[in-house]
Image (spheres, rainbow, N blue to C red):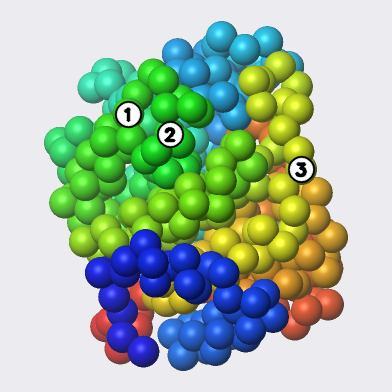
Amino acid sequence: MQIRNDWTIEEIKDIYNTPLLELIYKAGTIHRQFQQTGEVQVCTLLSIKTGGCPEDCSYCPQAARYHTNVEVHALLQKDEVMEAAQKAQKAGSTRFCMGAAWREVRDNRDFDRVLEMVQGVNELGMEVCCTMGMLTESQAAKLRDAGLYAYNHNIDTSEEHYADVITTRTFDDRLNTLNNVRKAGISVCSGGIIGLGETHEDRIAMLHTLSTLPDHPGSVPINALVRIKGTPLQDNPKVDIWDMVKMIATARILMPRAMVRLSAGRSEMSISDQALCFMAGANSIFSGEKLLTTPNPDFNEDQAMFDLLGLKPRESFKDEKIMVG
């Protein structure tokens, strides 16, 4: 099978609607062709600046306009971040992602401090990732020069459903940031969330956008909505595990070389649920007690699951080593 960036909506719909067991089998077959099976990338996500965000993303507890239990915290000090990165590395993480609740990155002292953090974590030999909102081309270049490996900017949902979820920025704003990241030579991390009140057509359209980018994202996080009290989506129904499996399997078939990440919502999944996601082609997780501000399984729980399923953590910078080798 060759890597394609010209998938049609109809083709993706056919894949997505394949009978489930057949879909898992197809995705697992492609996974074996392009990925090392039994190997999962372990990432840790730290909130370096929490809450007070001016955006109105209806799923997010960090939006200033919603009354959630999230306390606003200014940007962490570099030594606090380095301590968290070292702890994550000792526990087996190879990618360390720093999240700041900003609408966009501004060229100021806070950004200068983030550049120092990126440099510090990069020197530990970890893949450094940031997620800090919209980014200009010159800011992306500065992050790359500081040692940034990846930048996360999820498209969240389909272009058609986007304005029902977020009104303070557009779908094109998202794509523009992804373009700036790609131009800077930084690995793109972009996926979406299911459970936002979208249709199956919206999910298919979201995967179509990702799989027809000029280059597939290096990482594709598939998130299940974590329903947070105080946000507009607090009463949405829980995402069904089979919907997650279907999304992961379809993403794996469309983007065979990407790391497909089983992201938010894992704390509500059993080990069997997660095992199904790995069988469907997921090969990346976030580990650590929190995903920014929402609960997540801790390192020890994940280690026990890895032992049971015979999984091992993927080493850092593996793609570069393969290219060099």
Q: Are marks 3 and 2 in contact (CB under 8 Å)?
A: no
Q: Nearer the viewer, residue 185 or 27?
A: 27
Horizontal and vertical percent position of residue 106: 28, 21
**Residue 243 picture location, percent across and down:** 67, 58
Which quadrant holds the N terminus? bottom left
State the separation of the CA atoms marked 3 and 2. Answer: 20 Å
Whichever of callouts 1 and 2 sits on the residue coming sooner in the sequence is 2
> Are dots 1 and 2 in contact, CB under 8 Å?
yes
In this rendering, the answer to whether 43 lies above or below 258 is above
Rendered location of residue 240, percent (x, y): 75, 53
Q: Mark 1 and mark 2: span between their CA atoms? A: 8 Å
Q: Quadrant of residue 112?
A: top left
Q: Secondary structure at mark 2?
A: helix
Residue at mark 2: 162
Circle 3 residues within 10 Å: few <14, some 14–19, many ≥20: some
Name the residue located 31 percent from the left edge and 69 percent from the top edge.
Answer: 7
Q: Can you say which quadrant of the picture contains the C terminus? A: bottom left
* Left or right, residue 81 beside residue 153: right
Residue 317 seen in this snapshot? no
Task: Mark 2: give few (<14), some (14-19) or many (20+) Cα within 10 Å.
Answer: many
Query: Where residue 170 is drawn, which disc sits there?
Result: 1
* Residue marked by disc 3: 238
Question: Is disc 1 placed on a helix, strand or loop?
Answer: loop
Question: Label 2 is placed on what type of residue?
Answer: Tyr
The residue drawn where x is 56% and y is 46% is 199
Is 130 displayed left or right of 323 in the figure?
right
